[in-house]
Image (spheres, coloured by chain):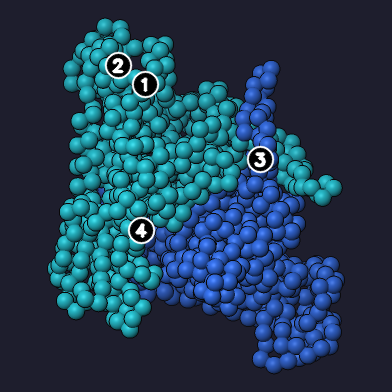
Chain colours: A blue, B cyan
Amino acid sequence: MTQTKATSVTPTRADDYAGWYQAVVRAADLAEPAPVRGCMTIKPWGYGIWERIQAILDRRFKETGHRNCYFPLFIPLQYLQAEAEHVEGFAAEVAMVTHHRLANVGGRLQVDAPLEEPLVVRPTSETIVGEAFSRWIQSHRDLPVLINQWANVVRWEKRPRIFLRTSEFLWQEGHTAHATEAEAVEETGRMLGIYREVAEDALALPVIAGRKTRREKFPGAVTTLCIEAMMQDGRALQSGTSHFLGQNFARAAGIRFTDADGAIRLPHTTSWGASTRLIGALIMTHGDDDGLRLPPAVAPDQVAILPVLRGTPEDAAVLARCDEIAGRLRRESWRGEAVRVTIDRRPGSGSAKRWDWVRKGVPVIVELGARDLAGGKVIAWRRDRLRDGKAEAGLDEFVAALPGRLSEIQAALAAEARGWRDTRLRDAATLDEARALLGDGGAEGYRSGAGFVRLPWSGSEAEEAALAETGVTIRCLVPAEGPAPCAVTGVATTDRAILARAY
Amino acid sequence: MTQTKATSVTPTRADDYAGWYQAVVRAADLAEPAPVRGCMTIKPWGYGIWERIQAILDRRFKETGHRNCYFPLFIPLQYLQAEAEHVEGFAAEVAMVTHHRLANVGGRLQVDAPLEEPLVVRPTSETIVGEAFSRWIQSHRDLPVLINQWANVVRWEKRPRIFLRTSEFLWQEGHTAHATEAEAVEETGRMLGIYREVAEDALALPVIAGRKTRREKFPGAVTTLCIEAMMQDGRALQSGTSHFLGQNFARAAGIRFTDADGAIRLPHTTSWGASTRLIGALIMTHGDDDGLRLPPAVAPDQVAILPVLRGTPEDAAVLARCDEIAGRLRRESWRGEAVRVTIDRRPGSGSAKRWDWVRKGVPVIVELGARDLAGGKVIAWRRDRLRDGKAEAGLDEFVAALPGRLSEIQAALAAEARGWRDTRLRDAATLDEARALLGDGGAEGYRSGAGFVRLPWSGSEAEEAALAETGVTIRCLVPAEGPAPCAVTGVATTDRAILARAY
């Protein structure tokens, strides 16, 4: 596949990594900024990726006993206020509904009918779920309660970036209540484990699983677990979080149950979420200077068949053959599901149409013209190896090999991402060493990023805050095999802080 | 199955139809009113029904070439204003976001940071989709655009009723743009056809498909098509609408395309929607005095297996056998999907547990105790024929017969609903006759409702408004075989108005 400057993405990763990201979002036709600042419109190819992520996560949630619900978009202010740390964490970014009507005043529409109490557009739903749990849960026999919802949430962002940080985004939020602390802690870990597996196995994102420091945890949580992925500029992207909430929200919402011994107790609750931000992680992990590259597990279509149409009578035969090939491929299965195939029936041939699909990151592209038809051959490209991945094959051979090829692509993208991450995950013993590895942030960009530094840590919140002033944060704490002296206190610790600049 | 007053729903349909509806929502654990007036929380069993409806509709939308997107929740006021009839239709019920922060003022949280321009929480998305289409569509080659979104919408309701009319509800809204009027009109009909088929085939709701009068159409549409279902009190429930929007929204949003002949034209657009209201239709069509009855196609679980657990060592063997039966049933398929089975593992036995599932409307209930285990038998009830549907069968026989039994239940519920509807769909020739059949609304309630009256109609909007003052509205117009004199004007017409009281 010959590449011309006109068809690849501008700017390149090396030229301007942030600009490249925005360009890929456009070039792959994933999403666009909405007219309301900070919001986005997710277009069909982007939404198709989200539908795949939803399906995979939803299956895992149901297999682990969770059921879906839907809680209201609007939260009474008093609920948000009930947990002090929680409301403090979200007050600066909540959209408020204050009126429920428009009135025509002298030909101009104005807000009318003020609400008695303004309503919060949910930034997350712990407080309103807590209110429901306080009615649903009476006895230890009602526990555990294991639910999830797929919903939109709103957090007014000062510096929005599409998929990564938008004022409205789509996510799932799980909420559970348990009779004992041990069960809730176990659930918190189980759900982080699911995020980790789905990130690594389906999204081909190598992640580091750990726990947040007190400074970085969810407002109101006792402990926040997270997975952190490394983008191609070395920065971290938090890609899923699971919170052990202790009895904080149970206390705030008045959730109580009668235990087997007759005692009245507060349950322990958890919450956990992953969002459309994962699409940003896919772009920044697997994208290249030709656009997006999608792991087959989350690609809306895994194969794009491109008929070469010349406006001649032969076109009908070419299209018929494409339908036949698509039908045969759809009868193949990969990872327990039918292979997903699309035919691009738009008029035209050659490179313009092909580059559209390259930019979208479809894992396999098949081109079929009248000549190939006569020769019984198909020409196919692997998106992960665009320069050397072109192959000509007989049809039967191509169809039979396709599921294996999808596995190869999935594995190749994962290995490439892991290789990059591993070269940029480095150990330091002191803060000076860490600073030297992480640099001053001035040389950021594609493959010039400093990556992650692993550092023995038992520092205080103040020491962490001082670090944050240099633009570096503790993404999470992970356990190490043996103790080492903390980089700031010198006290022996088995905790290692993962330091990075972050999105 | 012996029935005691304590276990059936109170009040009965005959005693208080509206009260019965609320009682079934509670008894089947479908949903509950939210703390914010007019909003609801959809609980797992209710949401499970919605997931089934979503899956069935989504498959049909994709088969007909539509792809899912996501548009922002917030709409700038100016967009809503661009289509005059549209904004007039929604101004009285829009929730408005005016601030994006909370501030602590003397220990009390208050709204802070006013927006320059207040934002409308979407009541529907024609205007914001139109803005996107104006950028997406340049050439006739970009058409048709066929998209759909699954979303929450907000319409501030004065008289909320759970599922039927809530301030926030879940729905799908399709939006399409076409080069020609004929194509858009065809699309409008195609999507109504899908609603009709899904209502009849999956939800077992007999519906009348027709078009709305000018008075009842969607604000801004040229034509609104609809399906109308009859509840057991004879009232109509609008269950899906499909709008031909002509060039109204294209003009308002400035959508233009260069046609094949080089001319600049406005496309013709459509929109179509169905919502969580369909769950209300299911309740009021199929529910009985014992609770909900669910058509197997939309039941979250089609079979509930209830082990009789006595806290003895035999329980383990009973549970193991239940797992085995569930496994065998899940390997059976019905309508192309694995049979959906749940096991109720809660301690206890007998009627309390069984009545829980009766009220939830699960199509088939299986009870299994140690004695049945020894005898190699299962005892099963059909929810559609609770009083005479109890059967004892050998396990192999029961498993093999299950898919056929689900078909029977699906058909029986549809036939029962159709039978009731048909007896209450009556013809009148004059307004006096119609009024006599429809009564004064005083004797409403279960099976005392007047139902639908079909009346020759070519009346004006004023004549329709006069009719509406009596509490009766024209649900839709349907074509008749031959002409008859209009009941108000005497002019020959092939239009028949379907008159009813409506939800």
Q: Which residue has dot 2 on it? A: B435
Dot 4 and dot 3 residues touching (CB under 8 Å) = no
Provide residue A361's location: percent of width, then percent of height.
50, 61
Whether residue A454 can be seen here: yes
Along the polypeptide, which appears first: circle 1 or circle 4?
Answer: 4
Neighbourhood count class around disc 3 (C-alpha, 10 Å): few under 14, some 14–19, many 20 upward? many
For the C terminus of chain A, the quadrant is bottom right
Cα–Cα gap, marks 1 and 2: 9 Å
Cα–Cα gap, marks 4 and 2: 42 Å
Q: Which residue has dot 3 on it? A: A97
Which mark, residue A468? none
Amino acid under label 2?
A: Arg
Dot 1 and dot 2 residues touching (CB under 8 Å) = yes
Q: Is residue B23 left or right of residue B396?
A: right
Dot 1 and dot 4 residues touching (CB under 8 Å) = no
Neighbourhood count class around disc 1 (C-alpha, 10 Å): few under 14, some 14–19, many 20 upward? many
Tags 1 and 4 on a common chain: yes
Chain letter of mark 1 equals B
Chain letter of mark 2 equals B
Q: Which residue has dot 1 on it? A: B472
Tags 3 and 1 on a common chain: no
Amino acid under label 3?
A: Val
- Foreground: disc 3 or disc 1: 1
Provide residue B497's location: percent of width, then percent of height.
30, 20
Along the polypeptide, which appears first: circle 4 or circle 2?
Answer: 4
Cα–Cα gap, marks 1 and 4: 38 Å
Q: Is residue B225 left or right of residue A86?
A: left
Q: Which residue has dot 4 on it? A: B356
Along the polypeptide, which appears first: circle 1 or circle 2?
Answer: 2
Identify the residue shown where x is 66% and y is 18%.
A107
Closest to the observer, B498 or B162: B162
Cα–Cα gap, marks 2 and 3: 44 Å
